[in-house]
């Protein structure tokens, strides 16, 4: 074994804090470039101290040499781990000859706290300031000083009903501003874990917190303010670990103090107003005079169990500079203290962003600076932040930086109003808030606009996958929408980077399903899932259920996470069986019109989705060994398909509606008999011709259009629809410089993210093998079948002739490179150690290859059997 294992992960995260699994699961990448080499065994050491591992001693667990090819989800089997315990581990592997690799670098994780709130010492902290249905809460500043002597480490646990920022000894812990965690606060509260060892000083320390409304008390689109309560609350634990092994816990109590803050209001989906004149110097540092501050209000009101959030929301801030600016008005006033803003500048960032602005200002005097955010150049739908600069009494120039901490906006255009002669704008940057993990797909072709599209698709996921799947980016759409997320959440579940986020979302969904199907609790006023979430005046419970089941299945197939199927099987079963009672003659009732349109088309398309979800539930039942449930659910799926055919298929084999969407749905979900499919495919092609090859489908089937065209043998039409540059089209928006995906200028649609699935599976050509055997899950066995655009269908030539791509997986990195030359098609693939690949060239011949680098060539002019030639295996 030539290399040490890499990318060590615990419960799908790198060095996670707040692990709640009693027996955490370990994963790693095998590092061995030798062809067809495998891991024959592994050895894991787990220790309570880093120094023990340095001497190759695992006091918590020593697995010994375990003969297994498993390198994912290896379960810890050592000494019981205590809440809050820090744990170190490393692994080495053995090759097919039994030779060992070097030990990996050290990895670590920290256990979470007990979920029951009664076991947490201390109280909930709040202030005397409350909001209302019409008024935001002024952000409160909360602080505490504490002694830390001879400490080797410290952890901070924060549970918030609201949003917060953190600093320790004046050093900010969160570079992206506040943590706006969402949950159904009546049922669950999430807490975050922070390692503050590096910020700690020997002696007196101080922690500073700014507490705002967040989702708990803030403005929620189409719902209003104070959906859960009228003022935010906070609960903190600081755990100090000393050199002698002792521990000290500092909890929320009467030694915490608060003061009204300098952020007048801070709405996550609204405005933020900062008065820099009121910021007390050193408020979050030791030895601050807090005599004017007030003891926090304490309460022990239970709010439900605590759930650990093993990742930080929105931990990436990409910076963008404006493309240009225009001065709208300028008049230098002789009255430097005048209240009227008399200057403004507009900025264009070239595309839609989700985030906030960063301003570097030169202020001679105190000035009111207002920042307007807009998606349109007319500034007809505007959100704004404001900042009152500190200035100076003597008129000397001071540098001030304004970056909102709580508000997140959707914008392309920015208008800054200020007082000429009082303020000078030195620099303007847009900060795009993103999901924390890096993207798993890297894509580079000779079609530059297509490359930009893939980049924009990834950025679009990051923009809407923060705490919950958001509907969109415009102010009225920046709210959870589980039904709409079905267009892209299963695709996101294919990526290893998103596992922690999706597990959090699944827990939210299970809470909602409990309310809907199991009658455990009444639904809260803002549960973003089932019956109480009504975007259009009604809800589509089945659409939400379908998202849930499809995402679970995707996690199982791509991340090999059988545990989630077992954990949520009751929800899978009950939700599917409920369809018989909630449908009308096994046809969907009240399908979500934003997904499916209206009328008969909506029922036709949405019932196809239900049929597939129920079949999937039956497959899961069989997989888990519930054969009685499998038969029950399989029969329900058959009956649903029969009811659909009776209602929507005419005796002549035609459909009862005639548009692109219905034919895509019928073909994609296999609702037609084999002899009926050619006519449906032909009609779909006719409709595409009539629309000049522009996709004209509803969001609910957007992700299925290109796969359907590919499956009916019209790859040329799939590429034509993809590569259209006139509107509406994906590339049209990209060519116009948009930074988020959409097919209409300025209209971001989250459903378009589903396009990534076809790009990965058909253009790059990587998919999990269709065999459902356990040893094929988690990318252990993959099918590599790119669909390059060449052949008789492409008379005008190949629009894409070269591609280099890579995809991160649970097992390692797969790479695919292909090129369409003048005389041959060439394909090169790299398979990670321990994996099996089935490579299918465009002529349909399969080649089974193991780990290593493999090259294939198909000579266009060759005679003989026409088979592609395997020219190199190395």
Image (tube, helix red, strand yellow):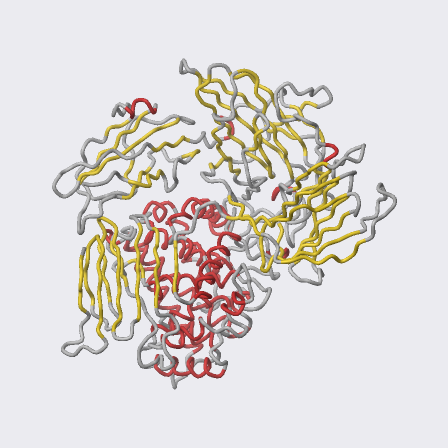
- Between 727 and 360, the residue placed more toward the observer is 360
Residue at point 85%, 41% (across, down)? 337
Q: In this rendering, is residue 88 above or below 36? A: above
Residue projecting furthest to the left: 97
155, above or below 782, in the image: above
Query: What residue lies at 17% left-to-right and 36% top-to-bottom?
Result: 100
Question: Which quadrant of the rendered structure holds the C terminus?
Answer: bottom left
Residue extending farthest to the right is: 334
Residue 20 position within the rendered picture, expressed as x and y whole percent measured from the top left:
41, 34
Location of residue 162 with respect to 695 vertically, above or below: above
- In the shown orientation, is residue 689 left or right of residue 277? left
Residue 701 locus on image (x, y percent): 46, 68
- Residue 868 in view in this figure: yes
Q: In this view, does 354 lie to the left or right of 507?
A: right
Across and down, in percent, residue 591 comes to: 52, 66
> Relative to residue 738, is residue 506 depicted above or below?
above
Residue drawn at (46%, 70%), measured in percent from left and top? 605
Asked whether residue 581 appears in the rendered view, the answer is: no
Residue closer to the observer: 393 or 557: 393
Tell me the residue at 80%/45% (across/down): 421
Quadrant placement of the N terminus: top left
Total numbered badges shown on the rendered structure:
0
Residue 109 in which image quadrant: top left
Q: In this view, does 772 lie to the left or right of 751?
A: left
Instruction: Please name whichever residue, 94 or 392, is drawn nearer the observer in this view of the structure.
Output: 392
Side of 689 relative to 340 (left or right): left
């Amino acid at each position: 074994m030539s290399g040490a294992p890499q990318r060590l992960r615990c419960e799908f995260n790198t060095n996670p804090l707040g692990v709640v699994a009693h027996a955490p699961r370990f994963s790693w990448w095998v590092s061995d470039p030798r062809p067809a080499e495998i891991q024959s065994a592994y050895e894991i050491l787990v220790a309570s101290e880093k120094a023990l591992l340095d001497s190759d001693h695992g006091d918590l667990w020593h697995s010994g040499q375990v003969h297994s090819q498993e390198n994912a989800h290896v379960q810890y089997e050592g000494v019981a781990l205590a809440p809050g315990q820090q744990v170190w581990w490393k692994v080495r592997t053995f090759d097919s000859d039994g030779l060992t690799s070097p030990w990996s670098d050290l990895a670590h994780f920290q256990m979470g706290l007990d979920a029951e709130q009664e076991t947490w010492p201390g109280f909930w902290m709040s202030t005397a300031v409350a909001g209302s249905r019409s008024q935001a809460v002024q952000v409160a500043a909360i602080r505490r000083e504490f002694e830390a002597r001879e400490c080797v480490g410290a952890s901070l646990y924060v549970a918030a009903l609201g949003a917060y920022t953190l600093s320790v000894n004046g050093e900010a812990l969160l570079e992206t501003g506040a943590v706006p965690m969402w949950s159904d606060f009546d049922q669950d509260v999430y807490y975050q874990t922070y390692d503050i060892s590096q910020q700690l000083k020997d002696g007196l320390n101080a922690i500073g917190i700014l507490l705002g409304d967040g989702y708990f008390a803030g403005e929620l689109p189409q719902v209003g303010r104070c959906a859960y309560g009228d003022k935010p609350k906070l609960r903190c634990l600081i755990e100090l670990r000393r050199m002698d092994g002792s521990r000290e816990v500092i909890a929320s109590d009467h030694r915490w103090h608060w003061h009204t803050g300098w952020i007048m209001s801070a709405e996550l989906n609204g405005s933020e107003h900062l008065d820099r004149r009121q910021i007390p110097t050193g408020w979050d540092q030791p030895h601050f005079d807090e005599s004017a501050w007030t003891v926090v209000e304490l309460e022990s009101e239970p709010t439900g169990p605590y759930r650990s959030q093993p990742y930080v929301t929105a931990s990436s801030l990409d910076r963008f500079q404006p493309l240009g600016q225009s001065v709208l008005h300028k008049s230098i006033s002789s009255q430097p203290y005048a209240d009227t803003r008399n200057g403004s500048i507009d900025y264009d960032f070239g595309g839609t962003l989700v985030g906030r602005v960063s301003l570097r200002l030169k202020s001679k005097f105190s000035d009111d600076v207002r920042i307007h955010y807009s998606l349109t150049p007319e500034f007809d739908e505007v959100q704004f932040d404001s900042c009152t600069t500190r200035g100076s009494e003597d008129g000397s120039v001071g540098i001030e930086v304004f970056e909102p901490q709580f508000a997140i906006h959707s914008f392309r255009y920015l208008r800054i109003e200020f007082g000429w002669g009082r303020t000078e704008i030195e620099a303007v940057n847009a900060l795009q808030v993103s999901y924390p993990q890096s993207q798993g797909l890297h894509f580079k072709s000779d079609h530059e606009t297509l490359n930009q599209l893939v980049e924009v698709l990834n950025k679009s996921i990051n923009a809407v996958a923060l705490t919950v799947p958001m509907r969109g980016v415009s102010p009225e759409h920046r709210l959870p929408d589980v039904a709409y997320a079905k267009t892209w959440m299963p695709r996101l579940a294919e990526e290893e980077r998103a596992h922690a986020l999706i597990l959090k979302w699944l827990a939210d969904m299970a809470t909602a399903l409990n309310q809907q199907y199991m009658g455990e609790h009444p639904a809260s006023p803002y549960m973003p899932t089932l019956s109480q979430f009504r975007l259009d005046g009604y809800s589509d419970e089945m659409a939400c259920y379908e998202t849930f089941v499809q995402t679970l299945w995707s996690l199982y197939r791509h991340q090999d996470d059988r545990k989630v199927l077992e954990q949520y099987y009751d929800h899978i079963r009950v939700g599917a069986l409920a369809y018989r009672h909630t449908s009308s003659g096994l046809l969907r009732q009240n399908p979500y019109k934003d997904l499916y349109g209206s009328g008969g088309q909506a029922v036709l398309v949405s019932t196809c989705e239900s049929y597939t979800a129920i079949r999937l539930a039956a497959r899961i039942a069989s997989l888990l060994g519930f054969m009685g449930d499998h038969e029950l659910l399989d029969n329900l799926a058959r009956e649903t398909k029969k009811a659909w055919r009776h209602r929507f298929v005419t005796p002549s084999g035609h459909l009862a509606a005639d548009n692109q969407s219905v034919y895509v749905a019928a073909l994609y979900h296999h609702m037609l008999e084999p002899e009926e499919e050619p006519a449906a495919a032909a009609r779909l092609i006719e409709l595409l011709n009539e629309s000049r090859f522009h996709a004209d489908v509803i969001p609910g089937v957007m992700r299925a259009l290109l796969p359907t065209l590919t499956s009916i043998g019209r790859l040329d039409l799939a590429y034509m629809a993809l590569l259209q540059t006139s509107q509406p089209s994906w590339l049209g928006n990209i060519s116009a410089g948009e930074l988020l995906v959409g097919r209409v200028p300025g209209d971001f649609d989250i459903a378009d993210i589903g396009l990534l699935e076809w790009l990965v599976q058909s253009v790059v050509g990587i998919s999990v093998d269709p065999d459902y055997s356990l040893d094929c899950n988690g990318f252990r066995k993959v099918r590599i079948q790119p669909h390059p655009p060449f052949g008789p269908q492409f008379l005008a030539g190949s629009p894409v002739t070269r591609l280099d791509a890579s995809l991160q997986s649970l097992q390692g990195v797969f790479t695919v490179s292909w090129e369409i030359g003048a005389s041959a098609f060439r394909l090169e693939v790299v398979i990670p150690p321990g994996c099996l690949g089935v490579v299918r060239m465009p002529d349909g011949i399969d080649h089974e290859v193991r780990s290593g680098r493999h090259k294939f060539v198909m000579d266009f002019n060759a005679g003989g059997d026409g088979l592609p030639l395997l020219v190199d295996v190395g």
